[in-house]
């Protein structure tokens, strides 16, 4: 009898309670988004990894970075793109948020290094937040908007469709994400209905700038896996 293989990828726990982001993001949305949607990406990713014999990949980041390179088996590449992207994107998303009353959401929590890079590339923090918010509001259908560190080391705002990620070779905007916003309807419809702009504005009040500052330092070192943590 063959031993049951342990699942390679696992759903990380939320770093706060389901209701912690209220009123900006509601408890029920967090329950469904984390326990159902994110969990389904993890389950389906593990199936694809097993089917494709991809257990030797050392990290989720290295796995999804090979989407579009021709290195992944054709019969599972679409699943790695969608489910692996879904896992990476959500693992980062939970970590980059914090309760609205938390000091971490204050712009004073932005590190001097990140603040300098934002000023250099956007002019000001306000302009950077406006840039990613406008990009998020403009995504057609389901997808994400990101603040990335480009291969050249600058900060840039990009958008990706579905669960694509800027680490993937299929992405038009390349880089290591340090902040991202999920604009799938499952991320906001229960509270905000069709008013995506209101959700995006609420999201800007729960950004964990301490974590984003940490993400920036990790991205400069090329450590995408450090950004998502143990997954
Ligand atoms: Mn989502």
Image (spheres, helix red, strand yellow):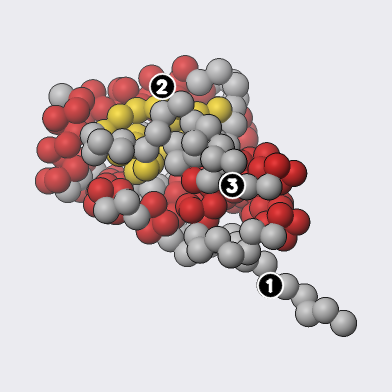
Q: Quadrant of the N terminus?
A: bottom right
Q: Which residue is mark 3?
A: 71
Farthest-out residue, right: 1
Q: Quadrant of residue 110?
A: top left
Extreme bottom residue here?
A: 1
Which secondary structure lies at badge 3?
loop
The residue that mark 2 highlights is: 135
Indicate whether 57 appears above or below 20. below
For the residues labelled 3 and 1, the Cα–Cα distance comes to 24 Å
Residue 63's x, y, as percent?
Answer: 54, 52
Q: Residue at x 68, y 47 (%)?
A: 73
Decide which of 116, 61 is in the foreground and name it.
61
Does 1 sit left or right of 64 as displayed? right
Residue at horizontal 12 percent and vertical 46 percent from the top: 112
Q: Residues within 10 Å of mark 1 (few under 14, many from 20)?
A: few
The percent position of residue 181, horizontal first and vertical second, equals 45, 35
| In the rendered image, the vertical position of residue 223 relative to residue 162, given as above or below | below
The total number of labels drawn is 3
- In 3D space, how far apart are the residues under numbered discs 2 and 1 (Cα atoms)? 39 Å
Q: Secondary structure at mark 2?
A: helix
Dot 2 or dot 1: first in sequence order is 1
Residue marked by disc 1: 6
Point out the frontmost of discs 3 and 2: 3
Element under disc 1: loop
**Any part of residue 206 in sight:** no
x and y, in percent, of residue 205 in the image:
34, 37
Residue depicted at 26% across the width and 27% down the height: 128
Q: Residues within 10 Å of mark 2 (few under 14, many from 20)?
A: some
């Amino acid at each position: 009898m063959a031993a049951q293989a342990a699942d390679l990828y696992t759903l990380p726990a939320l770093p706060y309670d389901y209701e912690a982001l209220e009123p900006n993001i509601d408890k029920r949305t967090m329950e469904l988004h984390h326990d159902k949607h994110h969990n389904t990406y993890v389950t389906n990713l593990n199936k694809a990894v097993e089917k494709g014999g991809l257990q030797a990949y050392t990290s989720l980041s290295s796995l999804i970075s090979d989407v579009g390179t021709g290195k992944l088996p054709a019969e599972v590449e679409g699943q790695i793109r969608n489910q692996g992207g879904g896992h990476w994107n959500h693992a980062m998303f939970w970590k980059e948020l914090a309760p609205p009353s938390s000091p971490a959401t204050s712009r004073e929590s932005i590190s001097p290094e990140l603040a300098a890079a934002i000023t250099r590339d956007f002019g000001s923090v306000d302009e950077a937040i406006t840039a990613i918010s406008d990009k998020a509001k403009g995504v057609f259908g389901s997808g994400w908007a990101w603040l990335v560190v480009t291969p050249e080391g600058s900060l840039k705002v990009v958008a990706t469709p579905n669960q694509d990620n800027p680490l993937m070779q299929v992405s038009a905007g390349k880089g290591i994400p340090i902040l991202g916003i999920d604009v799938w309807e499952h991320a906001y419809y229960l509270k905000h209905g069709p008013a995506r702009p209101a959700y995006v504005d609420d999201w800007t009040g729960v950004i964990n700038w301490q974590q984003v500052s940490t993400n920036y330092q990790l991205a400069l070192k090329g450590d995408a896996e450090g950004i998502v943590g143990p997954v």
